[in-house]
Amino acid sequence: MLELKEFNAYKNSEGRIARLPAKLGKKNRLSLALLDAFEFDVEYSEPELNEILKAYLDDFALVRRTLVDMGYLERDRYGRSYRRVAKALELI
């Protein structure tokens, strides 16, 4: 299980994140923290990816979209599979 101590205030009694931070910066940091649940260059189906994220929080779809929008997850053109990639800017 990932350490998400920074987000303890958002966790429920089960240790899952029950509500997302209101500030965009904190939502992005949470998404990046959850990125560690995924291996590089492993292809995940959308249901597999969702199940992994559901272990940590309720609003898995928002985090999934955020990671795609930030360039840390690539989605196939049909939205059926995802994989973790290094952001292009980090490779420079």
Image (cartoon, rainbow, N blue to C red):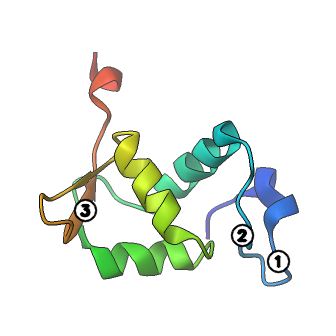
Instruction: Please tell me which residue lies in front, 48 or 75.
Output: 75
User: Which quadrant holds residue 75?
Assistant: bottom left
Residue that mark 2 sits on: 17
Q: Is residue 73 above or below residue 8?
A: above
Q: Residue at x 75, y 50 (%)?
A: 22
Which residue: 28% across, 15% down?
92
The residue positioned farthest toward the left in the image shown: 77
Label 3: which residue?
82
Determine whether label 1 and label 2 are within 8 Å by CB.
Answer: yes
Disc with the residue nearer the chain's start (2 vs 3) = 2
Specify whether 43 is left or right of 10. Answer: left
**Helix, strand or loop at disc 1?**
loop
Whole-number angstrom distance, CA of label 2 to CA of label 3: 23 Å
Q: Amino acid at mark 3?
A: Tyr
Residue 12: mark: 1
Q: CA distance from mark 1 to mark 2?
A: 6 Å
Earlier along the polypeptide chain: callout 3 or callout 1? 1
Q: Which mark is residue 23?
A: none
Amino acid type at mark 1: Asn
Q: Residue 7's spot in the image, x, y percent?
A: 78, 56
Give the mark nearest the N terminus, 1 or 2: 1
- Residue at 86% x, 82% y is 13
Alpha-carbon distance for marks 3 and 1?
Answer: 28 Å
Residue found farthest to the front = 22
Left or right of residue 10: residue 32: left
